[in-house]
Image (cartoon, grey):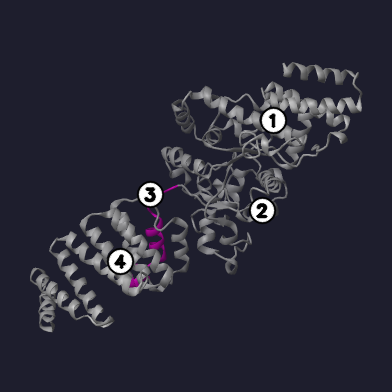
Amino acid sequence: MDVVLIAANASYEKGDYTAAIPLYQTCIQMQQQQSLGSLSMDSIYSSMEKLATCFTKTGEYDRAILVNNERYRKMCLGYGDCYPRTLSALHRLACDYSDKGDFNKAISLHEECLSKRASMFGASHDATLESIRTLSELKAKVDKHEPLFGKMKAKTLIELIDWRKLNRVGLHEKSELVRLLTSHAPTMEKRGATLKLFQAYRKLALSRNKDPSYWTIARVSALINGNHEILKPSCRFGNVDPASTLTHDARCSLIDMLLTKHFDSTSKHPVLDVSYKEAVGEKANLFVSFAYADSFIDLVDALELYMETHAKEYAVESTYFWFDLFVNDQWTASDKGFDWWANTFRETVEDIGHTLCFLSPWSNPLILTRVWCLLEMGYSPRISIILSRKEVLVFQLTLRIDRPSISKSLCNINAENATSFVPEDRERIFRVIESMPGGFQTFNVKVMDLIREWIAASAREMVGTSDESSSKDGSVGGVEGLGGGDGGVSSDDNLTERQLRDLNSYSILLSKQGQLEEAKKLYERALSGYERVLGPNHKKTIGTSRILSQINQ
């Protein structure tokens, strides 16, 4: 056997792979017959590796795959699937598939190998770096669009790598590895920001200018976060020093800046006083729709109120908001084409599944005049309206004393009259809406129905009639009420005359919206209360009884 192995190795070293193949095959058969322990198995695996290499060198890729697949299987059984040499065998098998041209299989195996190497050895190990480099080069070669290893996990690897080891695998700069991991065709960001990050931005903004009305979302984007607009001579906010913004040095999104520079509590951001781990979640579960001219301070207040009134559904520590200003790279946002925004963006809104629409002010919200915002609403499987606390109070007062003005303000949606900051986007979005079933008419009706349902839900919540039977998710059509109302009533015995007026008013509102069953319940409560407080012969008692009779007919 030794003579055969020596001859096989000699042919291999000379590059005479055709001659080496039968010698290695004979040698492996003899080694298997004489195998007595791990040392003998190591010899077999070594011979199998060289035999597979011979097949590759002679263009017999299928035979190389068969040999290396068998070698990997045996090593998994003998050593375990995460043993260093086993993972080297897996890496070699992935390369065989790549040599054959089966890139999908090769990428799958390389990703598996990278995952196991990173888990077992750490991100700075030479073997892990080898997998990163091989996989990134392969993906670039076949023009794959998915980021390596999942975006967050890949960037977490970046944080852990000892950069002094990069040159061992042909990489010499941190920026080079970052590029390899993230430079594939862009996908939509799926991560989200915590409420704590919004609060940190609000604190910073008000420390610079105490007037809340000064801080529109657009101004926060330009003066605090940093964006592409401030690099232009025509910047609407005048001369802004880019270096004074939080993301200028990193030239990336806010959350990526935190990831690469302020990952955990040992390296919190010196101004925001938050770390990446505190501020970012891997998967956003609420999408925030707004207009850039809206008040940032009021938006944060609205988000806080929403979290307070929906604590059973959304825990603060596990709720992550998809907010454009925080999760997207504002320096390159204008570089993405319309098709990317319209298609990839739609997938993200649908995937998150729940959109919070910020109305500011409630009586004339900018969001309902912006074509992008209306499109977000049209894409969303579930909508909730959010208002700041002061707008909640104004809305509740109007709901009591001037009900018709609410529908006049909010239920006359026409997407064809909406505007866009980029005029070309308006025309393109119009074409998208026109291509939808029913075109503009159906789209407008859908958005108006969402608004009407929210008004009804708000009225229901304020008079204390909201219950889980109202809809499948405890709301009406997936549109929650405001929360924070002071008119909630739980017992007919305690209704005051003003609360009875509220019940009657909300009953009329629901009747006009065609929600007769809900209206009937309120009229019945109002009638019972009027009989107790005013007596059966009072005109309000008689009028309510007459309306209830008409509904029952």
Category of crowding for the residue at label 2, using alpha-carbon neighbours closer than 10 angstroms: few (below 14), some (14–19), many (at least 20) = some
Give the distance between the C-alpha atoms of the residues marked 3 and 2, in whole angstroms: 33 Å
Which tag is nearer the camera, tag 1 or tag 3? 1
Name which residue lies at 28% across and 62% down. 94
Quarter of the image where one finds residue 414: top right
Give the distance between the C-alpha atoms of the residues marked 4 and 2, in whole angstroms: 47 Å
Disc 2 secondary structure class: helix
| Image quadrant in which the C terminus is located | top right
Q: Is residue 538 above or below residue 118?
A: above
Region rendered in magenta = 166-187
Disc 3 secondary structure class: loop
Three-letter amino acid code at disc 4?
Leu
> Which residue, given by chain and number where applicable, does mark 3 sit on?
185
Chain-order first, disc 1 or disc 3: 3
Q: Position of residue 544 (x, y in %)?
A: 81, 20
Give the distance between the C-alpha atoms of the residues marked 4 and 3, in whole angstroms: 27 Å
> Which residue, given by chain and number where applicable, does mark 2 sit on?
199
Query: Left of 495 or right of it: where is 103?
Result: left
> Which residue, given by chain and number where applicable, does mark 1 sit on?
456
Q: Position of residue 129 (x, y in %)?
A: 36, 68
Residue 95: tell me if it is visible: yes
Give the distance between the C-alpha atoms of the residues marked 1 and 4, in whole angstroms: 60 Å
Query: Left of 207 or right of it: where is 342?
Result: left
Q: Is residue 485 magenta?
A: no
Query: Left of 216 or right of it: where is 45?
Result: left
Category of crowding for the residue at label 3, using alpha-carbon neighbours closer than 10 angstroms: few (below 14), some (14–19), many (at least 20) = few
